Amino acid sequence: MKRFQVLAIIILSGAILVAASCFWPKDDVKVNLMGERTVKFIPKDELFNFKVVDNTKNVDSVIAILESRAYGIDENAIKRMSILDESVFKTSDFFVNPTLNDGSTALDNFFRALQQCDSSLIRVGHYGDSQIEGDRITSLLRIMFQDKFGGNGVGYVPMEDVTSPISYARTASPNWVRYTVFQNKSRTGLYCPGGTVFRYRFSIPESTRDSVTDGGDTIKIKVPASSYSNATLFLKLFRGYSTAKLWYGKAMEPANLKVYNSTNGDLLADVTLDSPDPFNVLRLPLSANPVSLRFVFTGPSPEIYGLTFDPPVGVQFDNYGLRGHSGDGLMLISNEFLKANFIKINNKLVILQFGGNVTPYVKNEASLNNIKNIYDKLYQHFKAALPDASVLVIGVNDVARSVGGTYASYPMVGRIRDVQKEVAQKNGCAFFDLLELMGGENSVMAWYRKGWASRDGHYSDKGREIVVNEIFLAIMGEYNKYLIHGKTSMK
């Protein structure tokens, strides 16, 4: 084939594609081919739009401000900060702490509890999706608050999870079964405050599981049937603890738990799990502060919620991340059950960080209104369970998708943020505007180029440090106002 013929074919093909874009319907084309499929094509408005949508001017100014004050997680700097230092703890432009009908603010209950953390342990439950799973974000908040108000430990440790944690190492035997309010729901309807519950089995039928090859392909692997005499959990912590606590539910028949120092094999605890109550906190003494532990469960499985590693006083942050979750499943936890659990563990603040997983599916006013109603009910649910505590909502962050060969925000992400902010304040919750912190819509690509986030909005280590820094300073700014107004004596 001659060169001019090749050139002619290229030009003709391009002309056909341009013509197709001019006449392609806005709603795309539906075809029935192995089920209903949608055939998409670049419309002419996008084809001839050569602008990159990334809100560059506004975002660059935001990034410059963040870079000028983001000190990272400098524990010594945090300890040196004076609570009443106006130069450090200023009111945040991204934070709303609404005044309630009684004249208090949404976070006053939490601030009041902070004043007592030198004589008791208060907990903060951080709920979210894959943005926080594996203790991401939560671990940094924990470090900053513990450095300022005291405490240590890693908080809540689930028996198993879909991701590896960053604050400890965990290996569980294969006969643990994980139930959540999002997937594989429990028949009893009872979950820990984070929305999970675990049981172990003594036999596992033959099954298949997904595995990823070196080339990145997903293949099915047959897992043979297996039998077990017990269920085990190995933990390696970054420091030793004198005690651990087991959260567990009703035991239909007595079960046994033995805890070993996995370094030398010493038996540390031998306890019976036989409580008829739906939520129990069992103290496990750990002599010699071991960092490597082996937990061995035998007998009929009760409902196991997880473990905690805490100090006797200070602040503790519990990570309740559920990949792919939008938050609505948490309403499956009975309000009274949740309230009783929060009282038992002394939880004084709940942080709700959801929205990323619903963003791709909110495409019109009807779906937006549906999401608004869901979050309205979710915030009400937690406020009712926490009458003497506080709720902080962290709004949706920017998320990009490919549009016509470039990346842009999902069109309704700003509206989702708006309804979250509206119903949070309506229900007496504080609100942190993560979208505005990033620079607004179409800001995620600037964060991506800085190495602070991926295109789908998940933060890198540096991005998480910046986000946590701003959240911490915002909360401390409000705490500073609380102290200045004389609502309690200064810590």
Image (tube, rainbow, N blue to C red):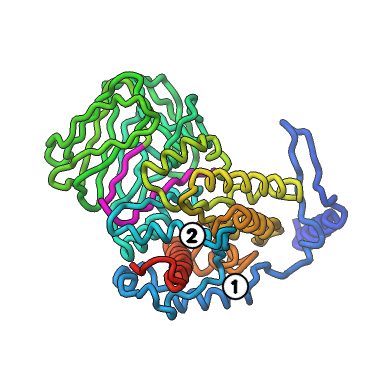
- Sort mark 2 into few (<14), some (14-19) or many (20+) by Cα contacts within 10 Å: many
Magenta highlight on residue 364? no
- Which residue shows up at 28% across the image and 36% down it? 282
Position of the N terminus by quadrant: bottom right
Position of residue 343 in the picture relative to residue 434 (left or right): left
| Marks 1,2: beta carbons within 8 A | no
Foreground disc of the pair 1, 2: 2
Read off the residue under disc 1. 59
Q: Which mark is residue 107?
A: 2
Q: Secondary structure at mark 1?
A: helix
Q: Is residue 290 above or below residue 294?
A: below
Residue 43 visible to the viewer? yes
Q: Is residue 290 above or below residue 113?
A: above
Q: Which residues are magenta?
A: 306-326
- Which residue shows up at 59% across the image and 58% down it? 101
Percent position of residue 338, x then y: 47, 39
Mark 1 and mark 2 lie on one chain; the one further toward the N terminus is 1
- Give the alpha-carbon distance from disc 1 to disc 2, as whole Å: 30 Å
Percent position of residue 354, x then y: 55, 50
Q: Secondary structure at mark 2?
A: loop
Q: Is residue 234 above or below residue 275?
A: below
Q: Nearer the viewer, residue 260 or 256?
A: 256
* The quadrant where residue 170 appears: top left
Magenta highlight on residue 323? yes
Position of residue 466 in the picture relative to residue 290 (left or right): right
Q: Which mark is residue 84?
A: none
- Which residue shows up at 71% across the image and 49% down it? 368
